[in-house]
Amino acid sequence: MSQRSVQRDLYRVWIARYSRWKPGHWSDVPPTSEALEPADRRCLSASEAQRIIEGFNRRMLQERSRFWAVAVPVRVRVDGDPCRGQVLKSPSITRRLEREVRAVNDERRNAKSDGAKNERRVGCQEHVYQGLVQSPQRSR
């Protein structure tokens, strides 16, 4: 199988900390900064990244903070995707898919049976609990 890159401009917006730099506008980029955490988990288009950066950095300018949003260009790779014209060996693909489907179905079946056991246990506990607790009117 091959490795292919999706050729589209994508960005991750990161919150960074800078020092010895003074931004003048929300679109300024610090010469160096330390990446702290992603502002969003997704890969974003240029316009989506710009909206996040503009809102965050305008706020940081008002607060005179040392945190800044920075767009980092990223490339998303799809490993294992076939190339056009590549021969696909269906028995191995089919066996792998069948194994994965079987594993998912087994997990679901186990979760259902565990849930039924827990429901029976909870039901029993509730029954016992309700049997021990009496209202004030019944105890008179």
Image (tube, grey):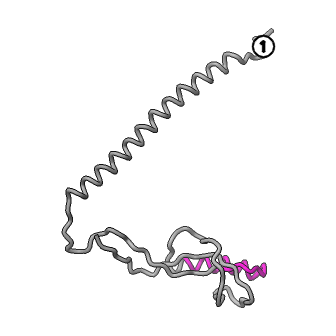
Q: Element at badge 1? A: loop
Q: Does any portion of residue 28 appear in the rendered image?
A: no
Front one among 74 and 61: 74
Residue displayed at 34% across by 76% down: 4
Name the residue nearer the viewer: 94 or 10: 94
Q: Position of residue 100 (x, y in %)?
A: 34, 51
Q: Is residue 50 left or right of residue 9?
A: right
Vertical side of 20 occupied by 133: above or below: above
Q: Nearer the viewer, residue 58 or 93?
A: 93
Q: Position of residue 75 (x, y in %)?
A: 44, 78
Q: Residue at x 34, y 74 (%)?
A: 3
Q: Is residue 71 above or below residue 92?
A: below
Instruction: Say whether residue 123 is left or right of residue 96.
Output: right
In the rendered structure, does residue 62 fall within the stretch colored magenta? yes
Residue 29 appears in the figure: yes
In the rendered image, residue 56 lying in the magenta stretch gets the answer yes
Amino acid marked by disc 1: Gln
Snapshot quadrant of residue 102: top left
The boundaries of the magenta stretch are 49-68
Quadrant into which the C terminus falls: top right
Res. 85 image quadrant: bottom left
Quarter holding the N terminus? bottom left
Q: Residue at x 46, y 38 (%)?
A: 111
- Along the horizontal axis of the image, is 8 left or right of 101? right
Q: Residue at x 42, y 41 (%)?
A: 108
Q: Position of residue 56 (x, y in %)?
A: 67, 76
Tell whether 100 sits left or right of 75.
left
Residue highlighted by disc 1:
137
Q: Residue furthest top?
A: 140
Q: Main secondary structure of the magenta part?
A: helix
